[in-house]
Image (cartoon, rainbow, N blue to C red):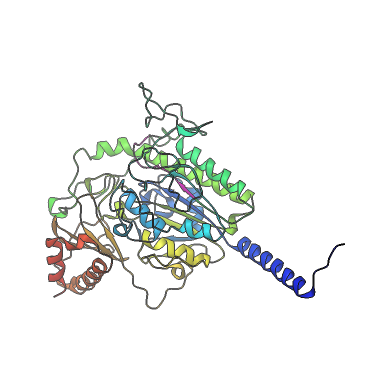
């Protein structure tokens, strides 16, 4: 004989059922998070940041319909430290990934781990660079909240990939059968940028019915400057712009950033066209991923972020690559699309950095952090509301023997280094960063204010770069 539930039991069952439905509904109402992340990317190659050579229509679409940050900085302009801050919201020395190839601490809580705990499907494809020296080291055992990480590789800038029954692998091989950065034979299915973007599309389609968080980490446009056809010759005839700072004087050159041999007009005309080709390939694949979101009806339900780990000087100041506090090295693109909370075409000029990403994006999503982050929640800024007490200043640091420490606002950049006297740049008056204003009387209040906050940062977050005797003495003298 079938027994009926008593009234109390029936009530509790109904409440539990309704609660379950409410939880499912709440999860369904939460935005997805998609991060499109590049490596060693000069912001000025993008149309939305003033670039005129490469037509980056898809990234520009995100900026036109979202918010663009004009002063977003790598907390350290080197791969691993920047990435550790981006995923954790903590300064590099606290992760403790202060330079490349240092494993991130097991206790670090990433935004992916927080979202996974909130019922999100999480995944990652591309370069990770936070698990030590492994290369390529597919699918690191320590996932840090990225549950699907089969297509995550620890480090390297491979150009040709393939799927095998045993899993993903580098397809390019040299004469000895060893993996190589070769691009021969790579096409729209095997070239790293295309191949990784396809993994993002596959993840989105498989998880379209539930909230998801996915990070697509493209290893380009980092060198080697090679790209598949037709991008390899697409910009061969372009008139490569020569940076005004390429041929600057010794007086205009700080000790922490001497010119590099072999960086000249001839070399830039040779290496920059394939760099532009890599950027164009990236933009086309951003379009492919956005089209997937449109086809699945998910675009307006998804926070889409386009950014990079650090920049590339591309010849500015007679240098290539990164590692110094100059704009081309340390400033990175940051564009965020979220029509629910972000006004189309919005621009944020206040200085932000990678350490601010986790608290900011979770703030936009209405999700509580783990309380371990050291960055700031700038979600109000991105949503068009500047808090009255907002401090327009970020702190960035050098590594690998370049132990400088720096405070940056939207307008000013103050650099202390054991390799030179302090430098202050007025980015509004001197966008090429050629003139040191540190000793100019009119800038004295700026120097004092920025230095005082830099000292406080170094003490609060234990930054050893502020303890170098020359740096410590110079900062103490500046605030007297």
Q: Identify which residue, 400 or 45, lies in the foreground.
A: 400
Query: Any magenta on residue 60?
Result: no
**Residue 4 locus on image (x, y percent):** 83, 67
Q: Main secondary structure of the magenta part?
A: loop
**Total tally of numbered discs in the picture:** 0
Residue in the image at 28% along x and 50% along y = 99
Quarter of the figure that contains the N terminus: bottom right
Q: Is residue 417 left or right of residue 372?
A: left
Q: Identify which residue, 184 or 240, lies in the foreground.
A: 184
Residue numbers of the magenta segment: 215-226
For residue 173, say whether it is visible: yes
**Residue 179 locus on image (x, y percent):** 38, 29
Above or below — where is 382 with respect to 268?
A: below
Above or below — where is 391 with respect to 271?
A: below
Quarter of the figure that contains the C terminus: bottom left
Q: Quadrant of residue 136?
A: top left
**Residue 55 locus on image (x, y percent):** 46, 46
**Residue 395 locus on image (x, y percent):** 29, 63
Q: Identify which residue, 176 or 407, lies in the foreground.
A: 176
């Amino acid at each position: 004989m079938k027994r009926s539930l008593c009234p109390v039991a029936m009530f509790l069952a109904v409440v539990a059922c309704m609660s379950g439905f409410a939880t499912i509904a709440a999860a369904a109402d939460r935005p997805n998070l998609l991060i499109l992340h590049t490596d060693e990317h000069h912001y000025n190659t993008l149309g939305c940041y003033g670039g005129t050579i490469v037509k980056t229509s898809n990234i520009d679409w995100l900026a036109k319909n979202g918010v663009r940050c004009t002063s977003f900085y790598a907390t350290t302009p080197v791969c691993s430290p920047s990435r550790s801050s981006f995923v954790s919201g903590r300064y590099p020395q606290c992760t403790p990934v202060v330079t490349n190839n240092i494993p991130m601490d097991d206790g670090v809580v990433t935004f992916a781990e927080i979202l996974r705990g909130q019922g999100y499907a999480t995944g990652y494809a591309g370069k990770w660079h936070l698990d030590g020296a492994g290369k390529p080291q597919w699918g690191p055992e320590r996932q840090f909240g990225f549950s699907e990480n089969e297509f995550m590789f620890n480090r390297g800038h491979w150009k040709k990939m393939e799927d095998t029954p045993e899993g993903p692998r580098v397809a390019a091989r040299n004469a000895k059968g060893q993996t190589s950065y070769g691009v021969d034979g790579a096409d729209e299915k095997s070239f790293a940028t295309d191949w990784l973007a396809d993994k993002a599309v596959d993840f989105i389609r498989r998880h379209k019915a539930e909230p998801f968080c996915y990070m697509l980490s493209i290893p380009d446009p980092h060198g080697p400057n090679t790209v598949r056809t037709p991008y390899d010759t697409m910009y061969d005839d372009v008139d490569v712009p020569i940076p005004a700072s390429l041929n600057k004087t010794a007086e205009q050159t700080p000790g922490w950033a001497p010119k590099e041999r072999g960086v000249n007009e001839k070399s830039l005309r040779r290496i920059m066209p394939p760099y532009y080709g890599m950027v164009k390939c990236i933009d086309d694949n951003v379009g492919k991923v956005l089209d997937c979101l449109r086809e699945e009806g998910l675009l307006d339900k998804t926070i889409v972020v386009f950014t990079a780990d650090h920049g590339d000087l591309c010849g500015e100041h007679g240098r290539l690559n990164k590692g110094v506090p100059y704009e081309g090295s340390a400033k990175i693109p940051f564009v965020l699309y979220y029509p629910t909370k972000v006004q189309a075409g919005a621009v944020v000029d206040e200085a932000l950095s990678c350490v601010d990403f986790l608290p900011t994006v979770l703030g936009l999503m209405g999700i509580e952090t783990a309380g371990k982050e050291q960055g700031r929640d700038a979600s109000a800024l991105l949503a068009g509301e500047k808090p009255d007490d907002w401090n327009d200043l970020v702190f960035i640091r050098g590594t690998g023997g370049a132990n400088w420490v720096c405070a940056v606002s939207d307008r000013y950049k103050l650099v202390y280094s054991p390799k030179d006297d302090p430098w202050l740049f007025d980015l509004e008056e001197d966008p090429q960063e050629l003139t040191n204003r540190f000793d100019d009387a009119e800038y004295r209040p700026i120097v004092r204010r920025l230095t005082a906050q830099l000292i406080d940062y170094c003490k609060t977050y234990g930054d050893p770069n502020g303890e170098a005797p020359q740096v410590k003495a110079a900062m103490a003298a500046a605030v007297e």
